Image: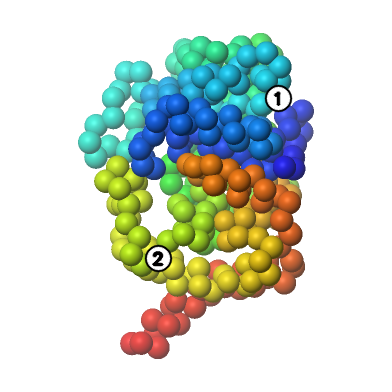
Amino acid sequence: MRYRMLGDTSVRVSEVGFGVWTVSTGWWGEVVDERSVRLLRLARERGINYFDTADTYGSGKGETLLADAGFASGHVRDEVVISTKIGYDFYNHTARRGQQERPQDWSEDFIRFALEQSLKRLDTDYIDFLQLHNTKMDAIDNDALFGLMEQFKDEGKVRAYGVALGPKIGWLEEGVKAMRERRVDGVQMIHNILEQDPGRSLIEAARDTNTSLLVRVPHSSGMLEGNYDENTTFAQNDHRRHRPKEWLTEGLKKIEQLSFLTESGERTLGQAALKFILAAPEVASTLPNIYDEKHIDEFASAPETPDLTVEELARIEELYDHGFGLEEQSAVRK
């Protein structure tokens, strides 16, 4: 495993992190707490030290799982980087069918309350990296909110803070403004070989402001793991089941054109997808979806595989800029 610093802070994170969403929400298939704890501990043994969760994941389960894994006790606490997110008021608003997002509350009373609740569930007295969860522009423009983040630092409850962009891909203006005007330590975004916008622009802003980026969905919801085929199906409770069939068929056509990344046999497609993201020095860590031991072995060893060459990166850029040739193919058929 290799490690990078989070912005100008003293927080050192593994290039491959562990997004606890996968093993705590049930949106990526069935989850069993004992199995989730075992995977978290195994990941740490393999050198992963950055664990990213949120208070809303499983209504707090994502945080309690980290405590159950023993990450808050003794010397282990000093060896792991615990990252969580706050901002959604799931305490007073339950999710309703068809409603993807609960209301957000950026008031001082609520944010301080939410932080204290997270600290209790994590069984720790400080959070290494606190993120404001899926910030819209109203939060980015809130002077008092970012003043409160600085207070948390002064109180020793937070070592670093930033924003997580979402829930879906996008939010370029919010991310750039957070980096340029709020001087956050880190910004979490969606970015991968198949979905490079607005990630490219966010990387440029991070370079200008010396801000670190944390990248989730590096495998484009599993597409870049290289395990799908045209007959792949997903369980009823798997969020990927709700994607249109074209997402799978077109994604497979794009994957076929990336075979040059694995032809040497020195890296898998899943590892190459991580190396693509890590080719940007502005990226501090990646957050692949880890849901079995095989993924820990594969992804944790990705940093030691060969870096993507300048030629490989240029070829990826050309493929993306030309829509992986799918538009041209469609035009020919017409």
- The picture quadrant where one finds residue 188 is top right
Q: Position of residue 87 (x, y in %)?
A: 46, 26
Assess whether mark 1 and mark 2 are in contact (beta carbons under 8 angstroms).
Answer: no
Q: In screen coordinates, is 10 left or right of 242?
A: right
Q: Identify which amino acid the numbered label 1 is placed on.
A: Glu
* Label 2 SS: loop
Residue 104 seen in the figure = no
Residue 124 seen in the figure = yes
Q: Residue furthest left?
A: 97
Mark 2 and mark 1: span between their CA atoms? 39 Å
- The picture quadrant where one finds residue 126 is top right
Q: Which mark is residue 79?
A: 1
- Residue found 48% across the figure and 20% down from its top: 64
- The picture quadrant where one finds residue 270 is bottom right
Q: Position of residue 40 (x, y in %)?
A: 55, 31
Decide: is 41 above or below 237: above
Q: Position of residue 117 (x, y in %)?
A: 47, 14
Q: Nearer the viewer, residue 303 or 284?
A: 303
Decide: is 16 above or below 234: above
The N terminus lies in which quarter of the figure? top right
Q: Which mark is residue 229?
A: 2
Q: Earlier in the sequence, mark 2 or mark 1?
A: 1
- Residue found 22% across the figure and 36% down from its top: 97
Q: Identify which amino acid the numbered label 2 is placed on.
A: Asp
Residue density around tag 2, few if under 14, some if 14–19, many if 20 or more, within 10 Å: few
**Colour pattern of the rendering:** rainbow
Decide: is 258 above or below 178: below
